[in-house]
C-alpha cells in the first residue's frame, strides 16, 4: 500500500515507485493499493513522471486499487488522470479494505 504525500513531486514519486519496485522484485505479477484521499492535484511535470513510472511497471501490474475517500471531485480527477497515465486495470474505492479486496481478486 502506498499512502501518497499531500503534495506530490517527481522526487516523491520516484521514492515511492523505487520502493514499490523493490518490494515487487521477483514477482511476475503484482497489485497495489494507493491512498489518494488527502492529495492535491499534481502539476504537469509530476503527472509526466507518473506516466513514465507506470509505463515501466505496467507489464507486471495486475491491478491498482485507488482509495479516494468520499470526495467526488478527487474521484473525478483521479479517474481521468488514471486512464490518461496508462493504468490498465484500476478501481476506485472509499475505503482501503475495499481496494485491498479488489487487488486480491485481480491476482486470482
Image: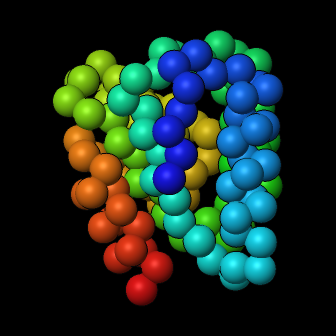
The part of the image, by quadrant, that contains residue 35 is top left
Here the colouring is rainbow
Q: Is residue 71 above or below residue 32?
A: above
Q: Residue at x 26, y 33 (%)?
A: 69
Counting labels gives 0
The part of the image, by quadrant, that contains residue 25 is bottom right
Q: Position of residue 52 (x, y in %)?
A: 78, 41
Q: Residue at x 72, y 46 (%)?
A: 17
Instruction: Answer left or right for 69 relative to 50.
Output: left
Q: Residue at x 48, y 45 (%)?
A: 34
Q: Position of residue 91 (x, y in %)?
A: 36, 53
Q: Quadrant of the C terminus?
A: bottom left
* Front position in the image: 57 or 4: 4
Q: Position of residue 84 (x, y in %)?
A: 57, 37
Instruction: Answer left or right for 61 relative to 10.
Output: left
Q: Position of residue 94 (x, y in %)?
A: 23, 41
Q: Residue at x 61, y 66 (%)?
A: 61
The part of the image, by quadrant, that contains residue 76 is top left
User: Quick check: can you spot residue 99?
Assistant: yes
User: Quick check: can you spot residue 57?
Assistant: no
Instruction: Answer left or right for 77 relative to 97.
Output: right
Amino acid at each position: 500500500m502506498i499512502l501518497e504525500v499531500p503534495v506530490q513531486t517527481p522526487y516523491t514519486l520516484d521514492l515511492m515507485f523505487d520502493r514499490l519496485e523493490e518490494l515487487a522484485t521477483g514477482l511476475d505479477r503484482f497489485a497495489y493499493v494507493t491512498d489518494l484521499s488527502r492529495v492535491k492535484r499534481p502539476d504537469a511535470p509530476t503527472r509526466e513522471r507518473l506516466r513514465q513510472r507506470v509505463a515501466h511497471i505496467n507489464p507486471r501490474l495486475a491491478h491498482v486499487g485507488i482509495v479516494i475517500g468520499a470526495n467526488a471531485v478527487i474521484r473525478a480527477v483521479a479517474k481521468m488522470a488514471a486512464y490518461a497515465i496508462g493504468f490498465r486495470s484500476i478501481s476506485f474505492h472509499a475505503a482501503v479494505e475495499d481496494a485491498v479486496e479488489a487487488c486480491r481478486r485481480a491476482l486470482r
